[in-house]
Amino acid sequence: MRDALSRGDREAAIEVMREPQRYRALFKDPQGSERYLALAQQVADDAQQHPCMDRTSQLNAYAALTGGLDLARSIHYLSLSARLIEQDPAASDQDKLEPWLHPHALMHGYFEAGGGLALDGEVPGLDRAGIEAWRRGQRTLAYQPELLLAFPLHMDDPQRERLFRVTGFTLLPAPRWHDHTALRALIHSDAYLDWLDAAPLHLASRLSMALEEMATPPWPEHLRAAGYQVRGETSWDDGTDSD
């Protein structure tokens, strides 16, 4: 398999992307991560020319390419993943939502809506007590809750409807699910925070993890370079002992 990959063999690349865990030993050398991403790129590019390629290989390739430090690139491959999942008759509504609940999709929507980060050394998370203090005007947060918590408004209408169906959203009647003014008003309610915390999607945890990722080096400098509003830095303990 290693020789076939070195020759750029198409079928070998598809096979490895179909079962990456089975072939992980091929990528344990210092350049393994770089070669794996190159392989994912080969499969992703090839899929544009051969739409009938193995679906699992495509999704694994897109997942690998979503993981970099470029939000625009991540959104491109998340969109391709979403399109592929939509075509799967066995996919559930939650399966079809997952690309748009990826941390990079959540934060891309936040930044595109005008959100920013003001980092002061601590890695921010979505903390209910902090949000309640912000609502009372007693605390300034590292992010803008009125934009981050409004993430359903950053989705297109079909995905918003799917989100509300999957979560059993009852805070507004279905005919008002696309009423931006009503949804923004809900953000200031305890019921909305309860909805974010609830199963099956545990959206508050997803938003918190997305915030934490964007605040963790080297993300802040990459976000600034891309033109997003990110000020300051966070300290990062990599677990090593400096003594």
Image (cartoon, helix red, strand yellow):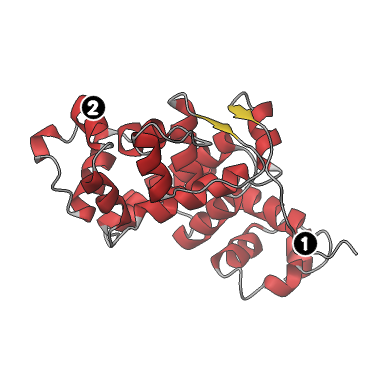
Under tag 1, what secondary structure? helix
Give 36 or 113, whichever is nearer the viewer: 113
Instruction: Assign the N terminus to one quadrant of the image.
Output: bottom right
Q: Which mark is residue 180?
A: 2
Identify the residue at image location x=62%, y=23%. Answer: 227
Judged left or right of residue 169, residue 163 is right
Q: Could you say where residue 59 lies in the image, as x and y percent from the top left?
A: 49, 56
Instruction: Assign the C terminus to one quadrant of the image.
Output: bottom right
Judged left or right of residue 101, residue 59 is right
Tell me the residue that label 1 is attached to.
32
Residue 114 sits above or below residue 70 on the image: above
Q: Could you say where residue 223 lies in the image, as x and y percent from the top left?
A: 63, 33
Disc 2 versus disc 1: distance between alpha carbons?
Answer: 46 Å
Mark 2 or mark 1, earlier in chain: 1
Binning the other alpha carbons within 10 Å of mark 1 as few (below 14), some (14 to 19) or many (20 upward) gives: some
- Does the rendering let one see residue 85? no
